[in-house]
Amino acid sequence: MSRPLAGPQGLLRTLNGRAILEALARSGPQTRSELMSTTGLSRTAVTQVLRMLENAGAVAPAGVDRDTRGPAAGRVALHPRLGFAAAVHVDHHAAHVVLVDANGIVRAEQHAPFSEAEDRVARIVALVESCRRSLKAAKGAVHLAVVGVPGIVTADGGIRDDLGPDGGAFRATLAAALDCPVRIENDVNLAALAELSAGVGGALASFALLLLDDGLGAGIVIDGALHRGFSGVAGEVMYLPQTPIPIGAPLVGDAVVGDLALGVGRDAAASLADHLEAAVRGDDAALQIIAEVARRIVLVAGSVGLVLDPEAFILSGAAAHPALVAAIERIAEEYEAQLPLRFLVSSFGPEAPLIGAVDEAAAALRSDLFARILAPAPKGTR
């Protein structure tokens, strides 16, 4: 005869509390009956846990449900003053800051370019404070930040970019200035996570996201999990060797596009975006530039495909421009007999790294808040 499941009441309250907090974070305000249905808990358990969460300041009344038949029932929601996480995307030109709450809702947003020789940390902190000031009706602390940056990010949060390794100095300085923990992540990896959680990558077991901006980077997902590599170098595909380009030389980027433009008689100072728009208008020289960039991207995909064999490649950033997508697909057809390659277009375009940062920041905020809310009281207290 099997024995019924049993356990310490504190553990059961913690498990039940987390179930209710997760349900409220996932679905928004709910009545007690809706929470019973969502969590499978009894009415008594829901009532007891809600009382505990209300005393902890974790939940608050959120109006009345008048849509269902019968007496109106009160709704509860996560308390609006639980605080926020900052999601930040930094590139070589600007910083984009979003404050997100535990429900994953964006509450404030600021964007500004970097001025000449401006300190990046100072600009990010100023944007975070500007976001906080805009939240007149919902004040709260910023508990943590997730920051997406270009460059190689090591496991300890150090950044290796064109200026060399920083040894974690950027993260430490930003954490001190914001007075909260800071997680640094490669921006292309965040774009891949965005596609995995809510984009075209969600239906794929494996894929490589190719993001073209100032350079070309890859976010690699294998068996539904992001692959960062032992030292954070996974995805640095811009330096894959291609004949006749020497090993270590960039395959694409602003300087490369400028050299290609010189070779066909176009302005070397024009951006890739300028050449893409000229290609749409039918400019022959611009079409040659786009064809060469597309050829290099296809060869990168082929190299990655031979090693990892992903289901598809997701084109993001400038690579998702219709003119470049068409050129990539056309050139890929030439290699189809030797190596079939499947290309998809990003669901989020240039916003993919920031969306990935928002998703990661919201998840980290929930984990942090719920752990603190449900932490057992110290022994000897009532």
Image (spheres, rainbow, N blue to C red):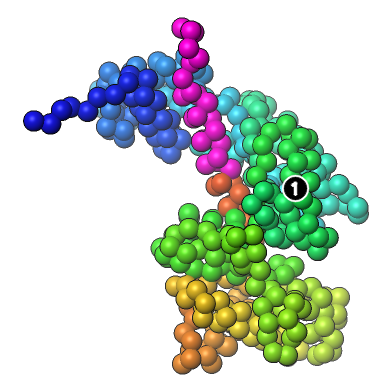
Q: Residue at x 67, y 37 (%)?
A: 181
How packed is label 1: few (under 14 Cα within 10 Å), some, or many (20 or more)? some
Q: Position of residue 245 (x, y in %)?
A: 74, 86
Does the magenta portion include 373? yes
Q: Examine the image and state in which quarter residue 348 appears.
A: bottom right
Residue 108, compared with residue 31, is above or below; it is below
* Residue receiving disc 1: 168
- Tell me the magenta residue range: 361-382
Relative horizontal placement of residue 69, taking residue 324 as reference (left or right): left
In the rendering, at what x and y percent does residue 331 appear? 58, 88
Q: Is residue 105 above or below residue 41?
A: below
Q: Secondary structure at mark 1?
A: loop
- Residue 114 in sight from this viewpoint: yes
Vertical side of 241 occupied by 146: above or below: above
Q: Give whichever of 283, 202 is nearer the camera.
A: 202
Position of the N terminus by quadrant: top left
